Amino acid sequence: MEQPTASLPRSPAGCEPMLVNCVAYGADGQRIGDLAVEAISDVLETPDQWVWVGLREPTEQLLETLQEEFGLHELAIEDAHSAHQRAKIEVYGDSLFIVVHTAQTVAGRIEFGETHIFLGRRYIVTVRHGASLSYAAVRRASEQEPDQLALGPSYALHGVLDFIVDNFFPLVREFREELQELEEDVFEDTFKRETIRRLYDLKKELLTLRLAIAPIQDILNQLVRQYPGLIREEVRPYFRDVQDHAARISQSTDTMSEMLSSAISVNLALVGVAQNEVVKRLAGWAALLAAPTLITSWYGMNFQDMPELARQGAYPSVIGLTLGVCVVLYFVLKRAKWL
């Protein structure tokens, strides 16, 4: 049953349909066709078919319709309607409700979003909020392998989670490249306030990225070991592979976080060293000027019995002595690297 694109429910902004995809599949993994939302319950009455639904920021009315068609729990529907949920996996009867955080680069900045997933024995529903790439590519790739898609909704769940986790790798690579650029700025001779700001912003974004990827590891660990009625045994090795990818990303973010902390500490230390060098040079010049100041202050006193005043060549001698002391002090301070 085909559903024309023009009839798809759309978001208030009208830029993208809220119901992105609603497709029925057979027990052999072959695509049967697109569905209207109201026809989902009819498909579920057929024992050898299951449904894959993709939503983007749906309205409350659309979620209520899906709740009736799939028999979803009202608390899960309430969470799926609003973003800003913590990453989690919850059991509602014979279905799972999963929340994972997503990330993508938007206009040169990393934006974060959420994907809420309903998983049943014969259906999977994905609900995207915020910055999240479409899972149409996952669906197309899965449909190219009907033997794998015949494993049912749990294999589709693997495809979605694998897509989400793999999308973190380019972000980690961008973090690493920017960190390398900042490391070069850290060791420049001149202090740049912009470098500290970029280091701080990068650390803040990296921390958010760590908070997004860390809970996925726990979710994948549960999917590997639990829920035998919903997760096919044949699919569990695929979840272990995704779990390995998530662990690699987590380790990379931990390493970069330590490197960022070190870069900030080194930058501040170098600023302190530069300031000490300036203070040391000022102290050196002050010591160099102290000698002539002391000598000339003596002869600036209005006394009659000052040394050498009555002798010819007294002033040139004092001037020569002053210059000699200054020269000696200059070379001494220069050798000590105070000038």
Image (cartoon, rainbow, N blue to C red):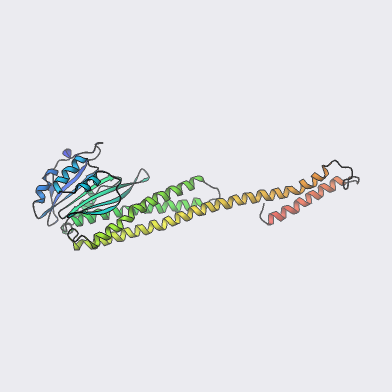
- 267 or 189, which lies in front? 267
For this orientation, the residue located farthest to the top is 13
Percent of width and height locating residue 318? 83, 48
Q: Residue at the location (54% across, 47% down)?
A: 191
Q: Is residue 319 left or right of residue 120?
A: right
76 or 328: nearer the eye?
A: 76
The picture places residue 95, in percent across and down from the top left corner, at 18, 54
On-image quarter of the N terminus: top left
Residue 104: where, in percent of width, then height? Answer: 33, 48
Tell me, yes or no, if residue 275 can be seen here: yes
Number of marks in the image?
A: 0
Tell me if 247 is positioned left or right of 337 in this view. left
Identify which residue is drawn at 37% across, 45% down. 109
Q: Percent position (x, y) of residue 11?
A: 23, 38
In the image, 153 versus 311, the foreground residue is 153
Residue 258 sits in which quadrant? Answer: bottom left
Instruction: Please give left or right for residue 93 compared with residue 195 in the image.
Output: left
Could you tell me which residue is drawn at 51 percent across and 45 percent down? 193
